[in-house]
Image: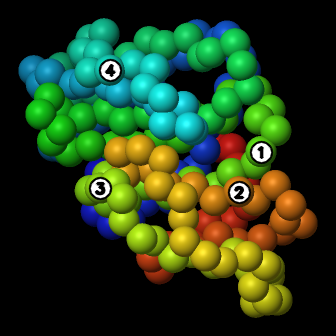
Amino acid sequence: MITQQYLSNMKCLNKNTPTTFFYKTENNQSGSTIVFNIWNDTGTQLVTDEIADGEISTQGVYEFDFTTPNSDVYLLVTGAVQGGIEPRPLTVKVGTPVIEKVFFAEKNLEASLTIPYNIFNFSGTSLQSGNLTNITNGFYSADVTSLAKPWVFEAEDIRLPDEPCS
């Protein structure tokens, strides 16, 4: 559940790999229609309003099977109850993209906002700051390719260390 702005712990997968994305409804509500959308990190939509493959038992948890592209890319995934209700974002790193990025999803997945950020080291020294780049549908990013680790990313009072995959 997204109750505030969201910084995603990124899931990392290999290229051309079958995977399953999951969506859990509020209060484990069974019988919902769950819709998935997937974009790459340039905003190109790869999956549009695809209905989940099924519900696991009657627990309000839904699954969507997907095969990652055969390219080094980031994927921006949302699952939601049909009509855009209770959207949940997920960021996926596929392979080894040339440009390293950190991602932020706005709590309502609202696009075209100005969201300032700061990246600092563990001594508190700012390494990079500015406004996040609006990608699509409430996903934002910043290029961190040139930054020496370790660092911490901060936007909208949310902090995330430089651990890109979970």
Q: Local crowd at mark 1 within 10 Å, few (<14), some, or many (≥20)?
A: few
What number is the disc on residue 143? Answer: 2
What number is the disc on residue 99? Answer: 1
Q: Quadrant of residue 123?
A: bottom right
Circles 3, 2 touching at the beta carbon (< 8 Å): no
Query: Measured along the vertical axis of the image, is residue 8 above or below residue 158?
Result: above
In the rendered structure, which amino acid carries the disc numbered 3? Glu
Residue positioned most to the bottom: 124
Sequence-first tag of 3 and 2: 3
Q: Quadrant of residue 59?
A: top left
Sequence-first tag of 2 and 1: 1
Circles 2, 1 touching at the beta carbon (< 8 Å): yes
Quarter occupied by the C terminus: top right
In the rendered structure, which amino acid carries the disc numbered 2? Asp
Residue 117: x and y in percent read 57, 75
Residue 29: x and y in percent read 12, 33
In the rendered structure, which amino acid carries the disc numbered 4? Thr
The answer to which of 46 and 151 lies nearer the viewer is: 46
- Which residue is depicted at the point 75% across and 59% down? 144
Would you name the residue on which mark 3 appears? Answer: 110
Classify mark 2: helix, strand or loop.
strand
